[in-house]
Amino acid sequence: MTNATFTSRLAGPTTLRIAAPIVLALLGLSVSGNAYMVHIASAGLIAYILTVSFNLIYGYAGIFNMALVMTYGLGAFTSVFLEVKFGFNFWIALLAAVAVTTILAVLVALPTRRLSEVFLAIQTLAFALALAEVVVNWKDFSGGTIGIFLIPPPDFFGVLLIGGLPAYYWLIAVFAWLVFELMLRIQRSAMRRKFTALREGPRILSAVGISSSSTRLVAFAISGALAGLAGVLFAHFQLVMDLDTFSFTRLIALLLAVILGGAGYFWGPLFGVVALVVMDEVSLATSSAQDLVYGIGILVLVILTRGGIAGAFSDQWARIKGRIGLVEPVVTASDTPAGLATAAASVIERVERMVLTERTGTVRQLALTDISVKFGGNTAVDHASVQVSTGEVVGLIGPNGAGKTTLLNTVTGDVPTSSGSIELDLIELIGRRQPEIVRRGIGRTFQSPKYIPDLSVVENVMLGGDGRAKASAIGQAVYSPQARRDDKRIQSRAMELLADFNIAGRAEHPAGAQPYGVLRMIEIARNLMLEPSFLLLDEPGAGLTEFERDEVAAIVRLLSEREIGVLLVDHNLPLITAACDRIYVLQTGKVIAHGVPAKVFAQDEVISAYLGVPK
């Protein structure tokens, strides 16, 4: 979907803010003498606003909201109902309608907070069908099967803005520009990173202390508000309404516009709407083969532009930059034989700067006591007890299937315990949600590096700081001054960490194009953005070169010197020996040994667990 470098570069320029109203003004002036073209331009801009709404929730956040078209219709009917039945003026009715659709969208989202993608879509479909039934039968509200006629036009200081005429085009153009500006701000903000993470890896959000449920609610709310706005503008553009206008056929057209334009791309809605308008006009001009022309046009676009039109432009722009030398090749010290020794020698010096926390002398303790985990009739963890204090590295080893990762998952709330307690400074963690556990000072990595392929390297690291931002969700969405200050601070810290890890040269490159070792470093750096007291590392040495494992060992030791407690799971015994103060050995979910590495590795039971034979 979204190409990280392409979209982030497009989002910022001031020229876009200047160009957008100019383009809208030129478009209005060029079509003002042609009633048909005014109609096309007006309808196109309303379609743009509605498509932005769907692209935000589906393209950005990965949520297929099948109730969006009914939200769009509710905005239209609510505004007209308030004007006709209660005498509200257009502007008050517009605000009320947008408020209603925003609240409705949140109500749709609330029951879906724990649902997977498929069941979420089914839930929104059920809500849409129920709402449609209510609207159809509430004849005073919707006009029933007949619809509503003679909708009063907006009044702007005595000037009637009649739908289909140039004056109404200017009203739509202003709102389209405001929506464009909003998306520019979202594109630059932490909110885009959160939405993209929600789409690609919701576990990452929880792991950095951000509630995926809350992020989902924000996506529904913003999308619902935009859909309601589009509905109000459409009602006063058409001046008549009926329920067929808001059928699922409109949802199919929306989905087509988003896919053709490029789901998740900033420019996707614009390209998608233009493509559909062009195909509509061409098919109308060839009435004898209208459906054939429309179908062929869609098929060609889908085949030739797998990521949509915006995706094709993004890929082409990346090739052009590579050819003309705008993109520098990524070379780090450890990429060259001559620089390998220098990089290794500088590991300690670089890592010493990584953690902001200074030594305070305060010791925190994470205690897992008598933990058991059962899946049906199978026992994954059997009365295991592990303790970690800040300032020490504790290893957790054992053969595959011993229950190591399951035990880590109980700490972060990913797996429920059957018995036992998990206490942080004598405060019980069992039953608490993962974002709260993270905010109390516990970070973690995963067996396979978790990252967002479509975000840049630095944006992946910045996610670790987004949960500690001071700006509210609304402030982040509109990219308020506080949100900008947060972003500046978070980006600065993320770049420092990337420099410390010797991968700053990759900062603006997509994370999905990075080698495995770099992905490991990204994940650790993202956790350091949390400024944790404890860090749970799940096989950080897996898949790394010997040099990279040495770096990990050095990083882990120096984290402990900065009073971070590390619980380290790994199969690489040299890494465990080099990094750990103490180790626990698990076999079939039970702790069979505990102590300093040298003594533990000499025990017959441990040797038997690994080799299958006694010493």
Image: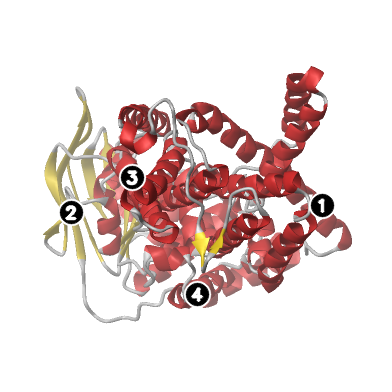
Q: Distance between the residues labelled 4 and 2?
A: 34 Å
Foreground of the two, 427 or 389: 427
Q: What residue did someone put label 4 on?
A: 484
Name the secondary structure under disc 1: helix
Quadrant of the rendered structure where residue 414 is? Answer: top left
Q: Residue 429 carries which label?
A: 2
Name the secondary structure under disc 4: helix
Q: Which mark is residue 319?
A: 1
**Direction from residue 305 to residue 460 in the image, left or right:** left
Q: Residue at x 47, y 36 (%)?
A: 69
- Mark 4 or mark 1: whose residue is earlier in sequence: 1
How crowded pointer 4 is (Cα within 10 Å; few <14, some 14-19, many 20+) is rated as some
Kind of residue sitting beneath label 4: Arg
Foreground of the two, 458 or 361: 458
Kind of residue sitting beneath label 1: Arg
Residue 240: x and y, percent? Answer: 51, 38
Q: What residue did someone put label 3 on?
A: 104
Name the front one of labels 4 and 1: 4
